[in-house]
Amino acid sequence: MAMRLQLQFLLPAIIERKSNYMISDSKRFAYFLPNIFTALNMGCGFASITQSIQHNFYLASILLLLGAVFDSVDGRVARLTGTQSQFGEQFDSISDVVSFGVAPSILVYQCFFLDWGRSGLVLSFVFLLCGALRLARFNANIEKVSSNYFQGMPIPGAALALVGLVLGFLEFGSLLGHPFVTIPYVLVFSLLMISNIPFPSFKDSDFVRKHMKTCLAIILALFVLLVLYEELMLGLIVNGYVISSVVYFLLHKGDFQDIFLWKDDDN
């Protein structure tokens, strides 16, 4: 009888404790999940570097494309699961420096500037430096800048622009590898990252919300074309985004006059 009474009191406590452990484990996994995608992004960047050194430029480019996919997923997973954190933000930025700063710089150096000596090193480093500055500014201003726009071109977009150049060069020949193309191309995208030109983020876009089905259809069509013709489509998509953003900014410059101006919190 005494044993039964003890079991009646102990069983609910054991069940409750076990359920609490299960809830705790699920919460830990939810916080861990976005960082898995961030780590995969960094892994793609590291693998791309190794392939660039071995002059396997196509695989190095595809790995950076895959890294961009993982990079686009980690933030969305964090928002969906409510697990956004400062640790995740900092880890994501470090990963981006590797995958979209170091890796594409080494890719273009090995592919285009290897025989240029110090000039090639400096030119490749400029892209990395501008990318790091872009990420540092983003982290410093993350709570102050509108979520509708990026301040300067995002580093993944600039990295994919270089990937598009390399893929185009591999597919269409030496013209895209000419110094008159590669030098201004790398410098322009480097400077775009540290510019104050607003680039749409589409995170809180009213247009996207109102035309969700149309936007999804366009994204799906572009994705299919990218898979089928990555050598051509990647460069067209990225450069189309850049040109349309810059043109829209120039035509509506007055509307963006104060978009990246803010008052310090201490004042």
Image (cartoon, rainbow, N blue to C red):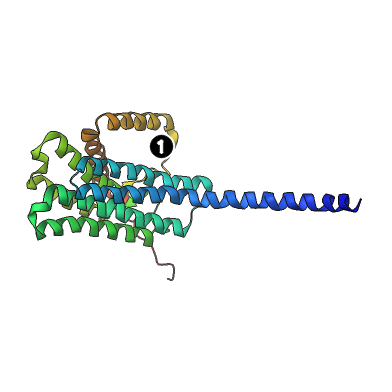
Q: Can residue 189 be seen in this view?
A: no
* Residue 14 locus on image (x, y percent): 74, 52
Q: Is residue 175 above or below residue 12?
A: above
The answer to which image quadrant residue 247 occupies is top left
Please report the residue visible at 73 percent of the width from the left and 49 percent of the height from the top: 15
* Residue 89 locus on image (x, y percent): 42, 56
Q: Indicate left or right for 118 with 133 as reference.
A: left
Please report the residue visible at 33 percent of the width from the left and 45 percent of the height from the top: 67
Q: Which of 142 and 146 is in front in this view?
A: 142
Q: Which of 72 and 26 is in front in this view?
A: 26
Q: Nearer the viewer, residue 139 or 14?
A: 14
The three-letter amino acid code for the residue at tag 1 is Val
Q: In which quarter of the image is the C terminus?
A: bottom left
The answer to which image quadrant residue 136 occupies is bottom left
Number of numbered markers: 1
Q: Which residue has dot 1 on it?
A: 208
Label 1 SS: helix
Q: Nearer the viewer, residue 32 or 93?
A: 32
Q: In this view, does 145 lie above or below 264?
A: above
* Residue 23 locus on image (x, y percent): 63, 49
